[in-house]
Amino acid sequence: MHPLELVTNLRAFLPAEAVLYESEDLKPYECDGLSAYRQTPMIVALPQTEDEVIRILRICHTSKTPVVARGAGTGLSGGALPHPAGVLLSLAKLKRILEVDPVARTALVQPGVRNLAISEAAAPYGLYYAPDPSSQIACSIGGNVAENSGGVHCLKYGLTVHNILKLRVVTMAGESLEIGSASLDAPGYDLLALMTGSEGMLGIVTEIIVKLTPSPEKAQVVMAAFDDIRKAGNAVANVIGAGIIPAGMEMMDKIATRAVEEYVHVGYNLEAAAILLCEADGTAEEVADEIRRIDKIMRESGAIEIRTSRDETERLRFWAGRKAAFPAAGRVSPDYYCMDGTIPRKNLARVLGGIEKLSTEYGLRCMNVFHAGDGNLHPLILYDANLPGELEKTEEFGVKILEMCIEAGGTITGEHGVGIEKINQMCSQFSSGELKIFHAVKAAFDPEGLLNPGKAVPTLRRCAEHGAMHVHSGEEKFPELPRF
Amino acid sequence: MQNIIDQFANIIRAAAGCKAPLRICGGGSKEFYGNRIVGQNIDMLDITTYSGIVDYEPTELVVTARTGTRLADLEAELYKHRQMLAFEPPHFGSAATLGGCVATGLSGPRRASVGAVRDFVLGVRMLDGRGDDLRFGGQVMKNVAGYDISRLMTGSMGTLGLLLEVSLKVLPLPPMEMTLSLQMKEAEAIEKMNLWAGKPLPISATCFCNDALTLRLSGAEAAVRAAHAKLGGEEVAEGAAFWQSVREQTHIFFQPGKSLWRLSIKSTAPPLSLLGQQLIEWGGALRWLISDAEVGTETVRVAAKTASGHATLFRSGESSAAAFHPLAPEMMNIHRCLKEKFDPMGILNPGRMYPGL
């Protein structure tokens, strides 16, 4: 269908300002949080109701027009990168919290609602929405569902998939599905899990019932410094081995610690090879008990310095540095490239050793921040895009890190998603038989392949050709957001 | 062990070649659950030979085991390291396997507080209906590469593939548990369970039956004692045995020989007036109904649906009955498409879940 004909058809039921096609109006939608990839869409549509979503999809389905869904656009893997001949479907206007049920501990929300807004609406009842991705002040719950977002507290409280009960989904053909239930399970296959983390490939989410969690009475954090990264890794294992599931457990290496200290002045130990932050939350009694045990384990694991937050202000200060790791990287280097591999924790020292070796080999600095509790590693490769050849070197370095993660029994993406960024690495992680199953799942929901084409799952042909990767996160679209 | 997988794959390929249905079977402890497999000359595919723990690192909180592993053996190994399958899967017999546990997707008393089987599944290795050996997910907590096939497999009753190995997140045993009993009526119990679940209290299981609400507290000793002081109630001496009886349905409520309905509904739903006796778990979200045949299937399904949930005929005298709640036609279409992709010849447990799957 001719673009203008499509615009006319959409404007038949959408107000003029909800259908954009002039190039200056399209510009803000050309990329998401991964700004290295840019593409102007043919049309941007901004529906306000599920009914409008259905009508848009039916028109696109009939005219075989690709559709890319977009929430707040904070994603880091280019999942919402527009299609040049497609409609970018922004869900930003579906932003109402329809109901908070404090007794059942659930909230019914539209996809454009910000993650943090749910917790704010639930706060008067002593409840909150547990998954807390670092971009939570801006990212939308619909995007969280698409990416199965986590956060620093996910070892204890789970990812998005553990914290939603029900979705309303519109398929590419314009059919509404009710997936999941207001109860704890639903009949049939677990399509709720299948939808979560499906990166906008299977359907458009129009309503979500999320679970709310009672706010803990108290939280306290232990900050421990180690002179050897292996000792810090062992300390993490010792905490878990002692039967403790911390609310959060984060690690930073020396380069990262120095970079953030310069930026936020927390008073981190600058001589330490690694800093561990370990948080306990729960009732006052639980926290007191757990903090005492964590402190003892850190000592026995050879910490050279241990500090426990004395009050809420100090607790937030201890965290401030960790949360500032990404902007701090931006201060010490013109560009940085953020990786997102997950590894079994026992292989941490080996993988970090490998990264260090590669760092020397490529002559590029790399700082490491690590969700230590769940094995999610974010190496930040520091480089300068203005130096000829440096971006290419960085990309190669990054690919080697991801391959090392796979080899260590891990995965190429823990929480940022595949999107367009890691599409080639999918070929390294999965066999052609496995990729065929992914394509089959896609076809069960969207047989024509019109939803978010070219993302998340590579074609077998692409894998055969395995083109070069062109990725960097040097310019973040949301530099003000903490990234961790 | 690879030779066993090759055998399984050959059986599946041969069955696919002549469109002969296969009945996947572990310990047979959950044979009663679901519908009878449809077809003639059904061959059995016994997975119990493929057993044993593949990898277990207590400090990683992950265990990977072959699906023929007896659930009791797996739990005993975890117990040695003071860890557990936190979702407390029911065994329903000593022969129960990990494969059956994941394929049926059933969880026990701790489900409302920690999550269900699907919440703990991290990865699977499986054979699809073509006999292809596939791996999805992994052994790490966070993994968003590809669609979540591992969780799709969980609870799919063997209709999408033969599970070979499963990686599960495990959790430490709580340092202390205490069981409390409080006398009250059903409506009050439902209200209290929901109210308390909204507070930061270490409640790990609830059960209401015969005008008594039984609660389990799990956690640090100080926290458990403090919660007891807040909630009141009598401490039950044989707490562990009580929860075991609820989990394994050996509690006196679960009289054999009668129809047992499982209604999974919104936790705040008021008492359901249905003919028969009820036992409530999961903070109000799970209602078991024991009844004589006279309570109509339709009546139970409507009651569950009205309470924003669904009803399963969990155990029944007649095996011809449709065990699972009917799906909306558009949902059934998606199910059929998925089945066709995973098992093109329709040979894996056909009909066990729904006709045509």
Image: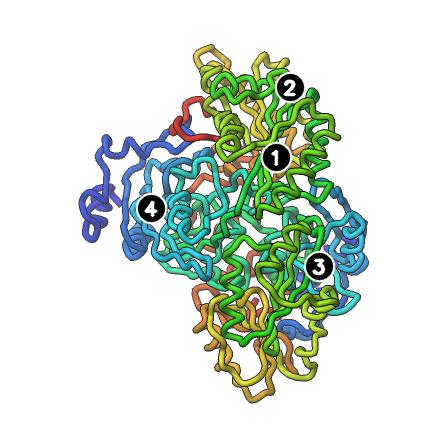
x, y (%) of residue B223?
63, 51
Residue beneath disc 3: B99
Name the spot of residue B38 as percent of width and height, x first: 63, 74
Residue at image point 72% right, 58% down: B98
Q: Nearer the viewer, mark 3 or mark 1?
A: 1
Whether label 2 touches label 4, CB < 8 Å: no
Per the image, the residue denoted by label 1 is: A278
Q: Secondary structure at mark 3?
A: helix
Q: Which residue is mark 2?
A: A272
User: Residue B55's quadrant in the figure?
Assistant: top right
User: Mark 2 belongs to which subunit?
Assistant: A
Residues at circles 4 and 1 in contact by the CB criterion of under 8 Å: no
Cα–Cα span, label 3 and label 1 = 36 Å
Mark 2 residue type: Ala
For the rendered model, the colour scheme is rainbow
Residue that mark 4 sits on:
A91
- Disc 1 chain ID: A
Instruction: Please tell me how crowded label 3 is: few (under 14), some (14-19), or many (20+) other residues with Cα within 10 Å.
Output: many
Front residue of B229/B45: it is B229
Circle 1 sits in a helix, a strand or a loop, which is it? strand
Compared across the picture, whether B212 is left or right of A41 comes to right
User: Going by the image, does A29 lie left or right of B188?
Assistant: left
